[in-house]
Amino acid sequence: MNLAKLWVPAAAVIAAPVFGGLIAGIDRKISARLQGRYGPPILQPFYDLYKLFGKDPLAVNRWQPFFAAMYLFGAAASVAWLALGGDLLVLFFLTTFTVGFLVLGASCVPSPFSRAGAGRELLQALVYEPVLILVFAAIFQQTGRWDAAGVWRQGGVLLAQTPLLYLCLFLVLVIKLRKSPFDFSASPHAHQELVRGVLTEYSGPFLAMVELGHWYETALLLMICALFWSSVPGSAILVAATVAGLIFVDNLFPRLTWRWMMARIWLPLPGLALLNLIWLMV
Amino acid sequence: MGMMKHLMVRSRRRSLWMMHFCLGGCNGCSIEIMAALTPMYDLERFGILNTGNPKHTDVLLVGGSVNHRNRRTLKNLIDQIPAPRLIVAVGTCALTGGIFNEAYNIIGGANRVVDVDVYVPGCPPKPEAVIDGILSGLDKFEQ
Ligand code: SF4
């Protein structure tokens, strides 16, 4: 392949965490304003991250840093792969692999909070992974392409044919970004039933790595959302609207239990996605 | 290099994740600390977040007096907080042992067991004083 093309994924790997961090900062600011508070500065997530990198590295065992690094690597590689215009099915496997490392990192320590968080993270993966694959299948059904570059070049507003699928993707986003009501594996707000779930046992630079990986995942999911309206202004509008929706859902809904999610979301969500897919086929 | 260091000091000053540990006492100080965490005072505007987890903590607020049993718990908690960390003693009990000082089981204030950076006097101190105490300890991060 052409070496000159490599600058696109390289730029994406650098820009994605900046984008993910800014989204986190805007989210915190708007949420604070919605609660009648002044709120932290928009750059707060970057201060947090930089501070964490400067703390003493205290690892529980030697696997923990390894899994944190692999999670970060997997998330960054997924972003690079999508920016390269790679195959969506490979991307699906990359995301699964990434979550796997997060779960392994949380289960390799004796803390019950961390392990319970890991179990819930797996349950969440069980809920959203089928939806993600159906979303990719629908993209293929519509455009005849599995590669992201081809989908993007084909242009058009995929959203018009796939509103239900986009709704499912939005719910996946809520689950993946740990927004309430689906924030039970690792809530961004500490002091909840599981402390911080999968993140409980990470500290200092290792926590920073996991946080950075999370920003990559945010960017990745929003990039997938952008595929649904493949023109630069169109995808910008779509992504902005999606982020606004996320913040409002986070603030409007009370926190729920994982049982609620399994019961109400597990079957209906892929069902809704499948319905949309069938509609595309007939 | 100077710039990276400057940025690190700035980040540490702007991002303080705190945890509160009550050793004993009458719990009045804990209630005031909780009051300081309410949306009314909006600690998040200083970058202060309540974590409840020593591994994520930068600032530990200690209330109450130390006795022979809880000193181990306090030491254990502090060992889990990665450096650099700030330890703030809140209330007369954590400063000197307070009204419990003469009791047979009391060792004294928190500084008998750990190195305290900031002392916030009062029985109990007001939430404003607690916030002021945390923020006046920030200069420790300059070093
Ligand atoms: S200092 Fe006063 S208010 Fe605080 S715990 Fe001790 S007795 Fe209670």
Image (spheres, coloured by chain):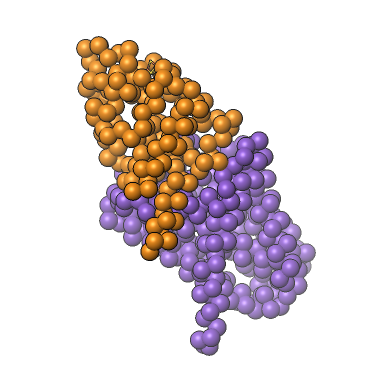
User: What residue lies at 39% left-to-right and 57% top-to-bottom?
Assistant: B5
Q: In the rendered view, would you say B118 is above or below B100?
A: below
Task: Return the residue nearer the eye: A127 or B54.
Answer: B54
Task: Return the residue nearer the eye: B41 or A11.
Answer: B41
Q: What hue does chain B carry in this figure?
A: orange
Q: Quadrant of residue A73?
A: bottom left
Image quadrant occupied by the N terminus of chain B: bottom left
Query: Going by the picture, which residue comes out furthest to the bottom?
Result: A2
Indicate the position of residue A212 as horizontal and vertical percent values: 47, 58
Indicate the position of residue B29 as horizontal and vertical percent values: 42, 21
User: What residue lies at 53% left-to-right and 50% top-to-bottom?
Assistant: A44
User: What residue lies at 64% left-to-right and 57% top-to-bottom?
Assistant: A169
Q: Quadrant of residue A83?
A: bottom right
What is the letter of the purple chain? A
Q: Can residue B57 be seen at all in this image of the molecule?
A: no
Indicate the position of residue A7 as horizontal and vertical percent values: 53, 79
Disc tally is 0
Does residue B41 appear to the left or right of B84 in the view shown? right
Q: In the rendered view, would you say A59 is above or below A136?
A: above
